[in-house]
Amino acid sequence: MRSTILAQKRAKVLRRSMTGPEQTLWLMLRGDRLNLHFRCQHPIGPFILDFYCTKAKLCVEIDGPTHEDKTEPDEHRTHWLNGQGIRVIRFSAEDVELHPAVVVAAIVQAAAPSTA
């Protein structure tokens, strides 16, 4: 599941140019504040994940307006990540901006160990 050198370089650029919603969520997730360690703009394989928690094998994606016409590539990416044992949850940029606490609560719930 190693990332490509190109993905690693691109991730570094993306970390420096996060969108407003990504910055908002990162401020709430970073530093193990939730007893979960998230990585920002983390490359896995050919993809760069907005946020990734290794312990929970959870990918959090923030979908802005540019994702409206990219459902097929997003589905392919999600399918590939699921095949690697990584769960993907998505939130709209608008939800992050308007309801950040609700988004964080949903992330914490998704990261919790399954009781099933």
Image (cartoon, grey):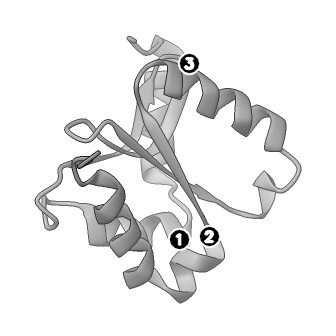
User: Dot 1: what SS?
Assistant: helix
Give the quadrant of residue 72: top right
Left or right relative to 22: residue 67:
right
| Gap in angstroms between the C-alphas marked 3 and 1 | 23 Å
The residue pinned by badge 3 equals 46
Instruction: Report the amino acid beneath label 2.
Output: Ala
Image position, residue 29 (x, y; %)? 27, 64
Residue 6 is labelled as: none
The amino acid sitting under disc 1 is Pro
Tag 3: residue type? Pro
Measure how far apart labels 2 and 3 are at the Cα level: 23 Å
Q: Quadrant of residue 43?
A: top left
Q: Is residue 2 above or below residue 12?
A: above
Residue 25 horizontal side relative to residue 46, left or right: left
Q: Nearer the viewer, residue 6 or 33?
A: 33
SS class, disc 2: helix
Categorize mark 2 by other alpha carbons within 10 Å: few (<14), some (14-19), many (20+): many
Mark 2 or 1 closer to N-term?
1
Q: Quadrant of the N terminus?
A: top left
Checking the image for residue 93, the label placed there is 2
In the image, 13 versus 62, the foreground residue is: 62
Q: Residue furthest front?
A: 116
| Residue beneath disc 1 | 21
